[in-house]
Image (tube, rainbow, N blue to C red):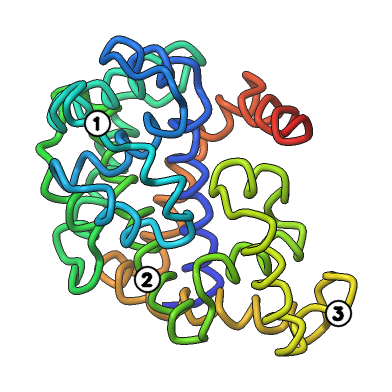
Amino acid sequence: MDLDTVRAVSRAVTAAHLFIYLVPETAEEAAELGVTDPGPAYLAFRSAAMGAVPWHVTLAAFYNFSPRAVRAMAGVWDAAPPERWRAARFLAAGRAMRRVGVPLTGDRIAEARSLIDPVVAGADYAGKVLAAANASVALPPDPLVALWQQITVAREWRGDAHLVVLAHNGLGPCDCLVLHTATGSLPTALARATRQWDDAEWSAATERLVARGWLDSDGAVTDAGSAARERIEVETDEHCAALWAPIGNAGARRFASLIAPITDAFTAAGTYQAVRERSDRA
């Protein structure tokens, strides 16, 4: 597999999955289950594929959240069992995609499934906790939402692989966030608000990165830090090459083009602009 193709299809998958965390339909479905706090709702929706696990397991699988952030999900399985959270997530995804008018015909959905299904079926799930959990979830009858769920498996597979690379490079949960925000790829205010590392923890992680030469004394990323961050992405791509091997470079590129209308529709609807504005206010 060509690593540029792996990077491109990974980005397409991430972008096509992302809307679920940003659209009002997700909050509405969570409220129907009795949870109105967006933090616990996010944690419940994303971890429900693993079943009624204690918050400690979600913390381990999500990696870059602080314990105080994830501890807040305690009680979500009392509000509703995981299978209801999974069903509500599918409802939210379907409602949102139809509200913005995702223009995927039945033929395009079927072609996309002919490419992603062998990827999901042939994947090695050793150490890929969230991907394996999502692959075990029965697909919904709605063809568009079923495609989105297969996209979700691929997205979580890359995420799981990324955590292995982070650990191999000695980047702990807070350290990886500090480095990520320093590169400008993730708004610091959004990361701090959602992951909930306190000032002392954030400062300690910054000091560790300064000691490695990846940040300067002002907390700005250095050339060495930028190179390290890119090396981590390349190593993740190298892991993901095996994921896409069943359909090869041409299949991966075709799949990326087939699912692009999902991202395009939410971009046109202003979904991603809205979250940028919220992060500026955080």
Q: Amino acid at mark 3?
A: Asp
Q: Residue at x 49, y 39 (%)?
A: 18
Mark 1, residue position: 75
Q: Nearer the viewer, mark 2 or mark 1?
A: 1
Q: Which of the two marks, 2 or 3, is nearer to us in this view? A: 3
Identity of the residue drawn at 75% across and 65% down: 183
Considering the numbered disc 2 on the image, is that residue within a helix, a strand or a loop? helix
Question: Whole-percent x and y of residue 29?
Answer: 33, 15
Relative height, residue 249 to residue 90 (above, below): below
The residue pinned by badge 3 equals 216
Residue situated in front as seen by the camera: 108 or 95: 95
Which corner quadrant holds the N terminus? bottom left
Q: Spatial distance from mark 2 to mark 1, Cα to Cα?
A: 29 Å
- Cα gap from disc 2 to disc 3, whole angstroms: 28 Å
24 on left or right of 105: right
Q: Amino acid at mark 2?
A: Ala
Question: Dot 1, crowdedness within 10 Å: few (<14), some or many (≥20)?
Answer: some
Which dot marks residue 105? none
Left or right: residue 54 compared with residue 6? left
Q: CA distance from mark 3 to mark 1?
A: 42 Å
Q: Point out which mark residue 161 bears.
A: 2
User: Please, is residue 57 above or below residue 230 in the view?
Assistant: above
Amino acid type, residue under disc 1 in the picture: Gly
Q: Residue at x 41, y 63 (%)?
A: 250
Image quadrant containing the C terminus: top right
Indicate whether 200 appears above or below 236: above
Secondary-structure class at tag 1: loop
Identity of the residue furthest to the right in this view: 218
Horizontal relation, residue 1 to residue 242: left or right: right
Q: Position of residue 72 (x, y in %)?
A: 38, 38
Tell me the residue at 83%/70% (across/down). Answer: 219
Q: Position of residue 273 (x, y in %)?
A: 71, 28
